[in-house]
């Protein structure tokens, strides 16, 4: 199964801290945005995207807002709900 996103890895200038820029294209098939868990805590910062939502287990979906951070716990089920344009996120693990 292919992943519904494109990842580009970076290292923060002057440190050894790594992060990923993850892009979900506006034409992604909604069936590919499945419930899943991550292996570590994550801070997700929204760089760009309109109409996308984040839904965590047993919670109502939250509108993803450009410029805001969202924290996802290790092993917490969550999924994305598709928006109107490409979604671009900065993801840091273990934060």
Image: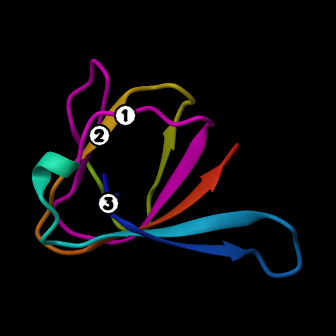
Residue 62 figure quarter = top left
Query: Mark 2 near mark 3, Cβ–Cβ under 8 Å?
Result: no
Q: Secondary structure at mark 3?
A: loop
Q: Secondary structure at mark 2?
A: strand
Please give the residue where the numbered disc 1 appears in the rendered image: 36
Residue ranking furthest to the bottom: 13
Please give the residue where the numbered disc 2 appears in the rendered image: 79
Query: Mark 2 near mark 1, Cβ–Cβ under 8 Å?
Result: yes
Q: Is residue 77 above or below residue 27?
A: above
* Residue located at (29% from left, 60% from top): 4
Mark 2 or 1, closer to the camera: 1
Please give the residue where the numbered disc 3 appears in the rendered image: 65
What is the x, y in percent for residue 79?
Answer: 29, 40
How many badges with numbers are in the image?
Answer: 3
What's the magenta region?
33-62
Cα separation between marks 3 and 1: 21 Å
Q: Is residue 2 above or below residue 39?
A: below
Relative placement, left or right, of 40 versus 78 is: right
Cα separation between marks 2 and 3: 16 Å
Q: Is 18 part of what is drawn in magenta?
A: no
């Amino acid at each position: 199964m292919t992943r519904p996103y494109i990842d580009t890895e970076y290292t923060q200038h002057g440190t050894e801290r790594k992060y990923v820029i993850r892009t979900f294209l506006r034409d992604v098939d909604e069936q590919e945005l499945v419930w899943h868990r991550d292996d570590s805590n994550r801070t997700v910062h929204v760089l760009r995207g309109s109409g996308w939502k984040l839904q965590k287990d047993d919670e109502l979906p939250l509108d993803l807002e450009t410029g805001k951070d969202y924290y996802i716990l290790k092993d917490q089920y969550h999924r994305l709900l598709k928006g109107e344009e490409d979604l671009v996120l900065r993801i840091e693990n273990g934060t």
